[in-house]
Image: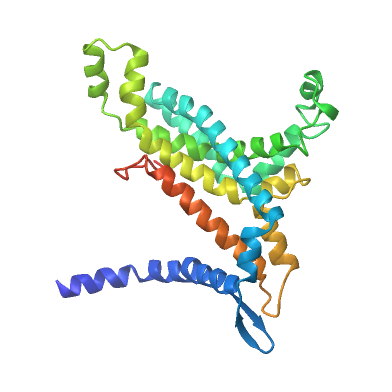
Amino acid sequence: MFWNKVSKALKATPLYVWVIMFTVLPLLMICFYAFFEVKLTGIEFTLDYFKAAVTNLDYIKTMGLSFRHAAISTVVCLLVGYPVAYILTGVSERIRGLAVVIFLLPMWMNFLIRTYAMRALIEKGGILSGVFELIGIENGTLIGTDAAIVIGMVYNFLPFMILPIYNSLNKLDHRLVEAAQDLGANAFTVFRKVTLPLSVPGIVSGITMVFMPAVTTFVIPQMLNNKVMTIGSLIEYKFKQEVSASAVSGTGAALSMVLMVLVIISMTLVNKFDKDGEGGGFI
């Protein structure tokens, strides 16, 4: 018994090393530089960086804007992704497998390439430029608008909403649906009373997988609307431009820490709806 435990621990060693090196240590470094300043004279404890991160009005507005973009993108992904996932569960297995592969294909491409492709569609002179002009959009482009950021996020993160919901719906016990129908429930009542509640774990998982990258991304806003500063772009700017003797920005570290705490709080509130911890994941 003892040697079995030792063997299992040794097999898991690469995982532990990976988590420590690329998750635990970076987080500890962020926490360290958020509260300590490295000077030529030594290391000094300071609350200035953290105080600035939570009291500076510009930082607060930037963070609020980022959460607004992420929330809108997540809602759009849910409104589009749930019907798509629901339809997928009702088609033949052959068509279903092909559709799932089609949704997975964009995820195999580089994130930057996908964003460049979206930019080519909505920029002036792009494929959709004429359509935008017909409906009255100025200069026939969405580049430089908040709508461009939301569209870019939805385009990139929609598969992360569809697949968990599809997985949750696909595992649904159809005997419950049949029982509801036998008791006289119509299609809408069956969906409202049976299908939707049982698919909540997949919805929660999809919201988590879309909201977290959406609120922290900086590539999409920079490429589709560099007129506004999001929290991801602000943190990147701080780490690039404001470096101390340790080559690490204390303000950037403090902002990263505040953002991490806010995201954890948001996801904790969302996960309250998934009390059994059965959030649907990828297939």
Could one spot residue 218 in this view of the protein? no
Question: Residue 217 in the image: x percent, y percent?
Answer: 62, 50
Residue at 51 percent of width and 37 percent of height: 159
**Is 66 situated above or below 189?**
below
**Is 214 situated above or below 11?**
above
Residue at 80 percent of width and 25 percent of height: 137
Could one spot residue 169 in this view of the protein? yes
Question: Residue 51 in the image: x percent, y percent?
Answer: 62, 65
**Is 189 situated above or below 26?**
above
Question: Residue 124 in the image: x percent, y percent?
Answer: 82, 33
Q: Residue furthest right?
A: 139
Badge count: 0
Question: Residue 129 in the image: x percent, y percent?
Answer: 79, 27
Q: In terms of depth relative to the viewer, which is nearer, 127 or 78?
A: 78
Q: Quadrant of the C terminus?
A: top left
**Hey, which quadrant is residue 233 in on the image?**
bottom right
Q: In terms of depth relative to the viewer, which is nearer, 13 or 137?
A: 137
Is 128 left, or right, of 261 in this rendering? right
Residue at 69 percent of width and 66 percent of height: 239
Q: Residue furthest left?
A: 1
Q: Say how the picture is coloured.
A: rainbow
**Hey, which quadrant is residue 168 in on the image?**
top left
Q: Quadrant of the N terminus?
A: bottom left
Residue at 70 percent of width and 46 percent of height: 221
**Is 88 situated above or below 25?**
above
Is 202 left, or right, of 260 in this rendering? left
Q: Residue furthest bottom?
A: 41
